[in-house]
Amino acid sequence: MIKKLWITCVSIALAGTLNAQDVKIGLKLGMNIASVNGSNANNLDSRTGFIIGATSEVSLTEKFSIQPELLYSVQGAQQKDNFKYDLNYVLLPIMAKYYVAKGFSVEAGPQFAFLIKDQLVPIDQYNGGGKENTDAENFDLAANFGIGYQFDSGIFFQTRYNLGLIAISENPDIKNGVFQMTLGYQF
């Protein structure tokens, strides 16, 4: 199923490129403030991580474009002085962007995430504590909402929230929630 989903996403991105008026490629880097949400996530705090990757923007009209991205993201949560829930993903967001004013855009779209690393790391790991796998799901689906601003020079800023739609773990029953701030450059 994941292979079919991947092929469909790439096909949509390529089909849009063939009919597009303008295609821009870029890089982005930023910071995540990640958490997990759910009935059993009461004692977990947010965790700061990074996000890095490539982006493209396919203009369909003067005000509307599609922005597929391929990103590496450090997410998870933590419990102060106890443990860190370390989840790293390869993300494939496909954002629809609408420019409401020159340079300023609102964006929304799905995000497909593939788990690369899942560990429960004790904060005091050097005094006998060991790392454990979390048994998190290998696939995550999120809805993204955000805003951005792009300068004429190609530099852009984006702020986005990723709302997890499916449980990444059944015990405890939790979903991802990530606030992202990124800086990038389009060629």
Image: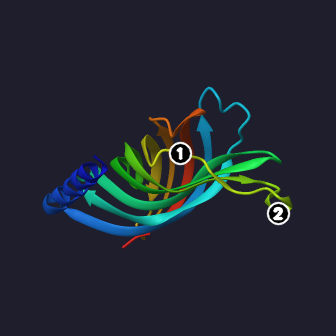
Q: What's the residue at 27%, 49% (across, down)?
A: 5
- The residue type indicated by label 1 comes to Ala
| Label 1, residues with CA under 10 Å away: few <14, some 14-19, many ≥20 | some
Tell me if 182 is positioned left or right of 111 in this view.
right
First in residue order: circle 1 vs circle 2: 2
Q: Residue 49: percent from the left, percent from the top? A: 63, 57
Image point (45%, 49%), residue name? 138
Which secondary structure lies at badge 1?
loop
Residue identifier under label 2: 126
78 lies left or right of 166: right
Look at the picture and state if 174 lies above or below 93.
above
In this rendering, the answer to whether 172 lies above or below 154 is above
187 displayed left or right of 166: left
Q: Residue at x 74, y 34 (%)?
A: 43
- The disc label shown at residue 102, or none: none
Mark 2 Cα-neighbour bin, 10 Å: few <14, some 14–19, many ≥20: few
Q: Which residue is mark 1?
A: 136
